[in-house]
Amino acid sequence: KKIGAPEVRSWSALTASAVALDASAPRTGERVASAPRSGARVVKDTEVTLARRVRRDPDVEEIRPVAVELLAGVRSGRVELPRVDPRLARFPDCVTASGGDAGALADVVIRDRKFAKAVVRIAQGAAFIRGVHVEDVRSACEYLGAKALVAIYLEQVVRRQFAPVREPHRSAVEALWRKAIVTSRVAPLIGAMLDAPWRDQVRCVALFHNAGGVMALSLLSAAEAPGELVEIEQLERDELFLAGPFGELLAERWGVPSVLTRAADALAPDGSVEHAVLAARAIAIQAGHLCFPGHLFADPVPHLEALGLGRHHLAELRAAAENAAG
């Protein structure tokens, strides 16, 4: 089944600094005030190590042909991508048209009950930690800001679209999505601790890469031969291979607004966003959101130390993780 697939434009500005994980990539540009310190110990994390290797050599033998063929099919349009729920589809255009004014977006948010409830719930959880009172959709939108609303929009879109029925794909998608949600809530808090200029944008960065992984697992479930047994370690390798490209394709297809893309172009070439996302991800995993065996060695402390933070910040970040998962 073929659909009209648009030409894919690069979305690497929104993802590369946080999740591309290529150690050889150049890091140039302006540094934020809380730049990573040199000499921080390197965390042993098999997922990160494998991701680096896969992205440097996409033809590694560990990737199954079905995953390679699936990527080619999605890029060419032979494999259809899910369409956005029509009740949410216009939201990115509304963000652009409003100039990012969160107050003006409240009228749009309130039209979708599930979206509005999610916005209020997330805002109340985040505001409670800071001692701020949020009572309705309008105050929730103003508290969160337009960039956070875009991330919540994407969260709702992805949540409604992907639901593989076979195992181990189904359990992996559920766990990966919980990890994505927690990561996307904790990473902005790390940015706020640093007073970093990317603290709002990082929510979307953390979420959408994982959305690509969720999509990959869902489409793999449909593409594999009926009854095929897949080891969880193999599924992890395939997901790592597909997550980044699928995230870019979803962003293109679902119209991530240019106001967010422009803001993301300036995201921390010094590596601070990558450390923030990986620290948030490790906190999510330690909170029990474990998807794959390669996650077992996740440790937030080296990434926090690289940002000038430390163990004494973990209590607040773990509280945010528990609230996000609730």
Image (spheres, rainbow, N blue to C red):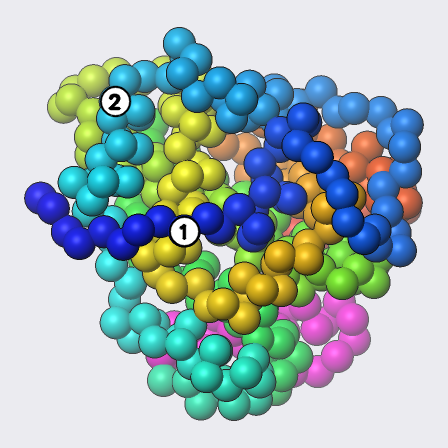
Name the quarter where the C terminus is drawn: bottom right
Q: Is residue 3 above or below residue 101?
A: above
Q: Residue 9 carries which label?
A: 1
Q: Which of marks 2 and 1 is nearer the N terminus?
A: 1
Q: Which mark is residue 66?
A: 2
| Figure label count | 2
Q: Do labels 2 and 1 touch, CB within 8 Å? A: no
Residue 84: horizontal and vertical position, in percent?
29, 63
- Secondary structure under badge 1? loop
> Which residue is more in the foreground, 162 or 175?
162
The amino acid pointed to by label 1 is: Arg
* Span colored in magenta: 112-136
Name the quarter where the N terminus is drawn: top left
Residue ranking furthest to the top: 61
Q: Is residue 176 above or below residue 168?
A: below
> Which residue is more in the foreground, 95 or 167?
95
The amino acid pointed to by label 2 is: Val
